Amino acid sequence: MIWHPSPNCGPRRDGLRPTLVVLHYTAMRDADEVLARLCDPSAEVSAHYLIDRDGPCVHMVAEEMRAWHAGAGTWDGLTDINSRSIGIELVNTGAEPFPAPQMGALERLLTGVMGRWQIAPVDVIGHADMSPARKQDPGPRFDWRGLARTGLSVWPEGLAEDSVFEDSLTRIGYPSAPPECRLAAFRARFRPEGHGAECVIDRRRAARVADVFQRQRARSAQVT
């Protein structure tokens, strides 16, 4: 772990603590270029951690502080995601796979972060999940299923009965956005092979994800 502090941070608001992890890709090719931007006061953007392709991890903002990574958006009705989350940036252009050393470093980092703050796997989300009209990261190449195999995310298998797609997306946690943006965000995470207009498989898959997410949230609430 390399400590390289960013000035782009502040106290978490209203006594909030991290209950979410938000994963990003940098959309930039070079880690040094990314680090320079995340530590530039004029950029007004940062994250708690940056993980390079071959695994090195840079710690830029103390976990107790509010990094400026999420921007406008909500998740499961929650606002001010910056005050509620740990932000992790992965060096990736958005058009390439995430290498095994990078994913391994992410898994190790998440294990520590989630343990320290008692963050449940269901509360590890992508930037596009909370802001589908603005963001696409970490995109359809990110291996959510693999992350779930390590117990660090949730990947519901199978399909449920056909249900209203928009209702299922709201139950999962997606905020209001144009339908095509919500569909793209959902598919990028839970059905990356999907394309074209909304179909019955999208609806049945979303209903299944919604059922599992709600059960996981209820279980997490009982634990905390």
Image: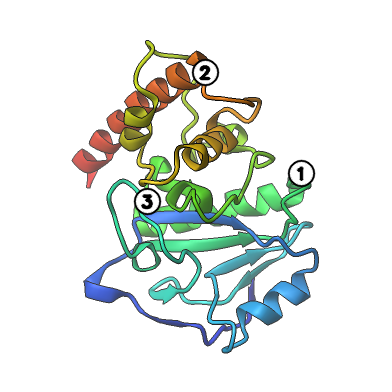
Q: Residue at x 44, y 71 (%)?
A: 63
Q: Position of residue 134 (x, y in %)?
A: 52, 56
Q: In which quarter of the image is the N terminus?
A: bottom right
Q: Nearer the viewer, mark 3 or mark 2?
A: 2
Which structural element holds mark 2? loop
Q: Residue 119 carries which label?
A: 3
Residue 33 vertical placement versus 131 (above, below)? below
Inspect the image, locate mark 1, and give the three-letter code of the amino acid beneath it.
Pro
Real-space CA distance between mark 2 and mark 1, rounded to the nearest whole angstrom: 27 Å
Q: Viewer-proximal residue, 127 or 91?
A: 127
Inspect the image, locate mark 3, and give the three-letter code of the amino acid beneath it.
Ile
Q: Viewer-proximal residue, 50 or 114?
A: 50
> Going from the N terminus, do you reach mark 3 or mark 2 first?
3
Give the residue at mark 1: 97
Q: Viewer-proximal residue, 222 or 41?
A: 41
Residue 95 vertical placement versus 211 (above, below)? below
Q: Which of marks 2 and 1 is in front?
A: 2
Real-space CA distance between mark 3 and mark 2, rounded to the nearest whole angstrom: 33 Å
Which structural element holds mark 1? loop
Real-space CA distance between mark 1 and mark 3, rounded to the nearest whole angstrom: 26 Å
Q: In which quarter of the image is residue 5?
A: bottom right
Q: Position of residue 157 (x, y in %)?
A: 50, 19
Count of marks placed on residues: 3
Q: Which mark is residue 199?
A: 2
Residue 32 vertical placement versus 200 (above, below)? below
Q: Position of residue 48 (x, y in %)?
A: 52, 70
> Going from the N terminus, do you reach mark 2 or mark 1 first?
1
Q: Which residue is drawn at 47% across and 46% down?
A: 129
